[in-house]
Amino acid sequence: MLKIILPTIMLLPTTLLSPQKFLWVNTTTHSILIATLSLQWLLPSYYPHKNPTQWTGIDQISSPLLVLCCWLLPLMILASQNHLQHEPPTRKRIFISTLITIQPFLILAFSATELTLFYISFEATLIPTLILITRWGNQPERLSAGIYLLFYTLISSLPLLIVILHLHAQIGTLHLTMLGLTPPTLNNSWTGLLSSLALLTAFMVKAPLYGLHLWLPKAHVEAPIAGSMLLAALLLKLGGYGIMRITLLTGPISDHLHYPFLTLALWGALMTSSICLRQTDLKSLIAYSSVSHMGLVIAASMIQTHWAFSGAMILMISHGLTSSMLFCLANTNYERTHTRILLLTRGLQPLLPLMATWWLLANLSNMALPPTTNLMAELTIMIALFNWSSLTILLTGAATLLTATYTLFMLLTTQRGTLPTYITSLQNSNTREHLLMTLHIIPILLLILKPSLISGILS
């Protein structure tokens, strides 16, 4: 654990002390080394918990998310190079330092075995994200997006803090392994119901559940590319991970809580998919598609079966990579045309033919076509939900159909059609962008060969 956290913290002096000429090279290579080192977490162990220290532990649920977390840092640094090139060197250093600061907090949040530490790191990831959005966003609306993000997260996580303190007063410990051994304290009384509700709401807002998702499209549209990748690939997963951890611990949730969350999640997947069909803004479309995918994750982790949990895990990892890749592609378009409106960036395939290949691959994996892990995840979740109640097949089936529709709509609008008259010349796609897309797509295609690495099942 420390051999990942310490190099990550040492990235800060590397960023601040590197000479101007080697700033990008040093930070990128150092973070890629950390990412390759973190791959050892995926190795299955004989113990359910690998405990590196007393207050952190890695098991099959957290190790894939930790590796994803380390994998995305070099990609975020790679993606941000172009839009920072005209900034003064000090600001570049501050930007990279902000990205690096989030990393230890995320690693702690995903590996904490103690609820207080988990809560602190869960909240601490908010501050650097807020700085990224409100300082480096593109439009003046970034301030309102930052306020939305701040207040949604804070209002939902105050009840979480109260319940954590209440649990500590009742049980006397907040250690996850100990909580698993104590008999469930949250029974069907009003206190138990409200406590479970408060525990879940904080993660539902983060995940986000349909109805509590309004901060997400705003934050995504206004954030710089690294902020978008961070939000889509890692911060949403904090919500899903939190739900999986908490539901496992607090015993079976009562039906009164099951049904509204399940209904909202599945209905939300349907609604946000149909909202995507009417979007004019490319980043907003990808943001809403994240809401519909995470709706499936929430629904699966609410019914708490082995199938559902492994499906939710695989979907979280594959959605993290896919949506991050889509945001990178949207950003390459934005850097060339300086607009996110779909109608103004259509017909780019003849101009950037190799980028069109990446668009095709990213969209096909977003649609959950074989041989991507998205397909396995969605099938597993649908079977688990169908097994729980056969009526859910209507909602999940319609949501899948709509997902395919809006993904094809996005692909056809950006790549096909007549070129707008105002585009006379475009900068070519460069090696950095192709490397970025390759590093996103390789895990998506390779993980299907051994899905047990990310399925949360002891292999």
Image (tube, rainbow, N blue to C red):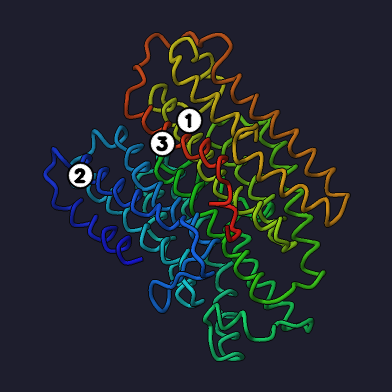
Q: At x 78% / y 48%, what residue is drawn?
A: 383
State whether residue 28 is above or below residue 42: above
Snapshot quadrant of residue 254: bottom right
Q: Are marks 1 and 2 in contact (CB under 8 Å)?
A: no
Q: Which mark is residue 26?
A: 2
Q: At x 69% / y 34%, what residue is drawn?
A: 403
Q: At x 88% / y 50%, what residue is drawn?
A: 390
Q: CA distance from mark 1 to mark 3?
A: 16 Å
State whether residue 411 is above or below residue 242: above
Q: Nearer the viewer, mark 1 or mark 3?
A: 3
Taking 284 as reference, is 423 left or right? left
Q: CA distance from mark 1 to mark 2?
A: 27 Å
Q: x, y (%) of residue 360?
A: 55, 23
| Mark 2 residue type | Asn
Q: Nearer the viewer, residue 372 or 40?
A: 40
State whether residue 29 is above or below residue 50: above
Q: Which mark is residue 330?
A: 1
Can residue 95 be seen in the rendering of this structure?
A: no
Q: Which mark is residue 439?
A: 3
Q: Secondary structure at mark 2?
A: helix
Snapshot quadrant of residue 126: bottom left
Count the numbered circles shown.
3
Residue furthest out toward the left: 19
Q: x, y (%) of residue 142?
A: 44, 46
Taking 326 as reference, is 134 left or right? left
Going from the N terminus, do you reach mark 1 or mark 3 first? 1
Q: Nearer the viewer, residue 13 or 451?
A: 451
Category of crowding for the residue at label 1, using alpha-carbon neighbours closer than 10 angstroms: few (below 14), some (14–19), many (at least 20): some
Can residue 350 be seen in the rendering of this structure?
A: yes
